[in-house]
């Protein structure tokens, strides 16, 4: 789906899941700030679903803080969707290079088993990581409906605050939002 489709087509009636992939979230901001984000938010609040991988996770947060202090890579700013009501900060782990696998790795995630009501859930699993963020102070947003689904097992290379999360879920209106700093897809 392109920005033109989001802005001009009647996609919301038939879309089961709106997915924002990794890459860089500034392109999303340039194309969708304003009307596009209002359409996305309305879609979710009315029962739609949003899945944000890596850049899509940064984009779905209230604030993006990416590589603060790095003159080449730094991106800092508010985000309009605010599905996660806090900061997504990264890189969670050092080594990221755009258009490269130089900083990629399989990170171990600890599953918050209590968040899953049924089925067999592993204690940990590995997921592809390349430049993703951490959802800062995620535990402080429980009163706003944020559920931590997984945390990073390894120590972070950026400040994650209290209860930093790798994957979060939140009910937004009648819809569902899943944001992840990794690429489990």
Image (cartoon, rainbow, N blue to C red):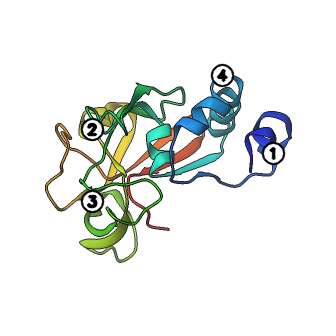
First-in-chain label (1 vs 4)? 1
Contact, mark 1 vs mark 3 (Cβ under 8 Å):
no
The quarter of the displayed image where residue 4 is located: top right
Q: CA distance from mark 1 to mark 2?
A: 32 Å
Question: Which element is circle 2 on?
Answer: loop
Q: Residues within 10 Å of mark 4 (few under 14, many from 20)?
A: few
Question: Mark 1 = which residue?
Answer: 11
Question: Mark 2 = which residue?
Answer: 136
Mark 1 vs mark 4: give the one in front.
Answer: 4
Mark 3 vs mark 4: give the one in front.
Answer: 4
Q: How many marks?
A: 4
> Looking at the image, which residue is at 40% across and 37% down?
145
Question: Mark 3 = which residue?
Answer: 112
Question: Mark 4 = which residue?
Answer: 34
Tell me: residue 136, above or below residue 101: above
First-in-chain label (1 vs 3)? 1
Contact, mark 2 vs mark 4 (Cβ under 8 Å):
no
Q: CA distance from mark 1 to mark 4?
A: 18 Å
First-in-chain label (3 vs 4)? 4
Left or right of 155? Residue 132 is: right
Left or right of 175? Residue 100 is: left
First-in-chain label (2 vs 4)? 4
Left or right of 39? Residue 23 is: left
First-in-chain label (3 vs 2)? 3
Left or right of 48? Residue 184 is: left
Q: CA distance from mark 2 to mark 4?
A: 25 Å
Q: CA distance from mark 1 to mark 3?
A: 34 Å
Q: CA distance from mark 3 to mark 2?
A: 16 Å
């Amino acid at each position: 789906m392109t920005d033109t489709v989001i802005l001009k087509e009647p996609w919301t009636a038939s879309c089961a899941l709106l997915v924002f992939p990794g890459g860089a979230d500034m392109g999303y901001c340039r194309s969708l700030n304003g009307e596009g984000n209002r359409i996305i938010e309305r879609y979710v609040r009315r029962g739609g679903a949003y899945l944000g991988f890596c850049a899509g996770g940064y984009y779905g947060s209230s604030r993006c803080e990416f590589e603060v202090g790095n003159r080449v890579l730094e991106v800092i700013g508010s985000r309009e969707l605010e599905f996660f009501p806090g900061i997504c900060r990264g890189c969670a782990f050092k080594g990221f290079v755009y258009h490269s696998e130089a900083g990629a790795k399989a990170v171990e995630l600890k599953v918050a088993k209590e968040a899953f009501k049924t089925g067999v859930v592993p204690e940990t699993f590995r997921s592809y990581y390349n430049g993703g963020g951490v959802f800062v102070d995620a535990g402080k947003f429980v009163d706003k409906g944020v559920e931590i689904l997984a945390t990073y097992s390894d120590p972070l290379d950026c400040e994650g605050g209290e209860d930093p999360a790798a994957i979060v879920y939140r009910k937004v209106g009648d819809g569902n939002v899943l944001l992840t700093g990794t690429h489990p897809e």
